[in-house]
Image (cartoon, grey):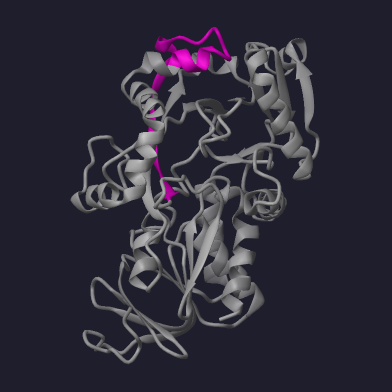
């Protein structure tokens, strides 16, 4: 790792800040808001490689405010999701961001899924999720008349929101509090010293701060390594593909309809999700792809392919989950396969009811041993904190997670 005394190539005068935050997604913007709330009047800079905020995971998602149902008790996800949801509801109310508490059903299709459903209920209770209740087949149809199953859990406090709108309001708050936000600022070099850290952009601009917080999402591992961190874990991109229900069929779904997930995987499976704009999504799939911005399946980037295939954890992961991968390929290739998955819960759905949707790319951290990292993960390098893994429910948890990140930054 270069130290501050190594100034080769760092020749332009650097702008000076108290805190520099890398990444203008929901986590980076939330951290900036938290830092300015704790230290009013401090100089805070947020730099973003794209030409606007929330260009990646923060705007390419299902828009669900999770209640904290699934997560292992004691994990950061469990602790921060419930707290984060409460903070987010308050923020949205104050900032006039539209939120709809449509509720969620987690449906067991047959008796074989009942033990897993019971475990989800146990976790929800341990995590302090309010209002959860168990329903039989008749009870679930009262909530979702077109759905079927032998039992379900109902989470009435699960909601939907447009997280891009949340990010826009966070950016407004950043500006109102005196923070700076720069777009088209891709970090190319990191140099840390005893009292400060200096960042250089790909265009040669520089910024110096007492500390830096890296919330770089899909590029978090590369920037962490650039700053001197261990390369384990590595980000491996998974594309989540969504389809939409035709408007004439939206009445088939009232709220969120989810399967009982495989507890071994950090993905929740194909579900049905109303949106605040009236759309109803089906998805996502979870397909390993060849670029960290593969919003189209055809997008390939040599550096991203190389990083994925050179990582031993990728091959160990694929060796373990190849059968699941074949199923995801089928979903990505066939609208009928998507419809078949969804019709297990809403039998009236057919392939002709589905329209093209959109794709999002999940920054999934994969450990060297092939393990899919399933919790929020932070690490430190000199003068810096790095968010190494922030999967769902990171958007829901963003304000609570930002407080934890700010705690870590305050220790620098």
Residue 265 seen in the current view: yes
Quadrant housing residue 200: bottom left
Instruction: Name the spot of residue 277 as percent of width and height, x first.
Output: 53, 33
Instruction: Name the spot of residue 70 as percent of width and height, x first.
Output: 65, 38
Instruction: Name the spot of residue 366 as percent of width and height, x first.
Output: 42, 49
Quarter of the figure with the C terminus: bottom right
The residue most toward the left is: 302
The residue most toward the top is: 348
Quadrant housing residue 325: top left
Quarter of the figure with the N terminus: bottom left
Q: Residue at x 44, y 53 (%)?
A: 54
Instruction: Name the spot of residue 332 as percent of width and height, x first.
Output: 34, 26
The range drawn in magenta is 339-366
Residue 350 within the segment the image draws in magenta: yes
Nearer to the camera, 384 or 319: 319
Q: Residue at x 35, y 35 (%)?
A: 319
Q: Residue at x 23, y 41 (%)?
A: 299
Tell whether 123 sits left or right of 370: right
């Amino acid at each position: 790792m270069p130290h501050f005394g190594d100034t080769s190539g760092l020749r332009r005068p650097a702008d000076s800040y108290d805190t520099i935050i890398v990444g203008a997604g929901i986590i980076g913007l939330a951290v900036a808001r938290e830092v300015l709330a704790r230290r009013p009047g401090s100089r805070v800079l947020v730099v973003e490689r794209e030409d606007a905020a929330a260009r990646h995971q923060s705007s390419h998602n299902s828009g669900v405010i999770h209640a904290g149902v699934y997560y292992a008790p004691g994990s950061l996800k469990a602790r921060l999701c419930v707290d984060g949801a409460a903070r987010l509801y308050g923020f949205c109310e104050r900032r006039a961001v539209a939120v709809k508490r449509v509720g969620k059903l987690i449906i067991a299709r047959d008796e074989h899924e009942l033990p897993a459903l019971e475990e989800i209920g146990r976790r929800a209770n341990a995590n302090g999720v309010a209002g959860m209740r168990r329903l039989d087949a008749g009870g679930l149809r009262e909530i979702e008349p077109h759905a079927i199953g032998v039992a379900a859990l109902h989470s009435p406090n699960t909601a939907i929101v447009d997280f891009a709108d949340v990010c826009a309001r966070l950016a407004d708050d950043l500006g109102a509090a005196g923070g700076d936000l720069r777009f088209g600022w891709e970090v190319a070099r990191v140099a840390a010293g005893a009292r400060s850290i200096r960042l250089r952009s790909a265009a040669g601009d520089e910024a110096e701060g007492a500390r830096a917080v890296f919330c770089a999402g899909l590029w978090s591992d590369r920037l962490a390594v650039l700053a001197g961190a261990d390369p384990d874990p590595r980000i491996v991109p998974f594309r989540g593909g969504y389809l939409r229900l035709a408007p004439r069929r939206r009445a088939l779904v009232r709220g969120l309809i989810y399967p009982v997930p495989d507890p071994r995987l950090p993905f929740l499976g194909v579900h049905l999700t109303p949106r605040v704009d009236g759309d109803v999504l089906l998805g996502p799939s979870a397909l390993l792809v060849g670029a960290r911005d593969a919003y189209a399946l055809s997008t390939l980037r040599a550096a991203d392919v190389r990083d994925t295939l050179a990582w031993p954890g990728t091959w160990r992961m694929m060796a373990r989950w190849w059968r699941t991968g074949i199923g995801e390929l089928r979903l990505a290739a066939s609208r009928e396969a998507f419809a078949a998955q969804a019709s297990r819960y809403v039998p009236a759905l057919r392939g002709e009811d589905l329209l093209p949707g959109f794709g999002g790319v999940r920054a999934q951290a994969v450990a060297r041993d092939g393990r899919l990292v399933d919790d929020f993960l932070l690490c430190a390098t000199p003068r810096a904190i790095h968010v190494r893994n922030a999967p769902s429910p990171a958007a829901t948890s963003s304000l609570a997670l930002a407080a934890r990140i700010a705690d870590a930054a305050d220790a620098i």
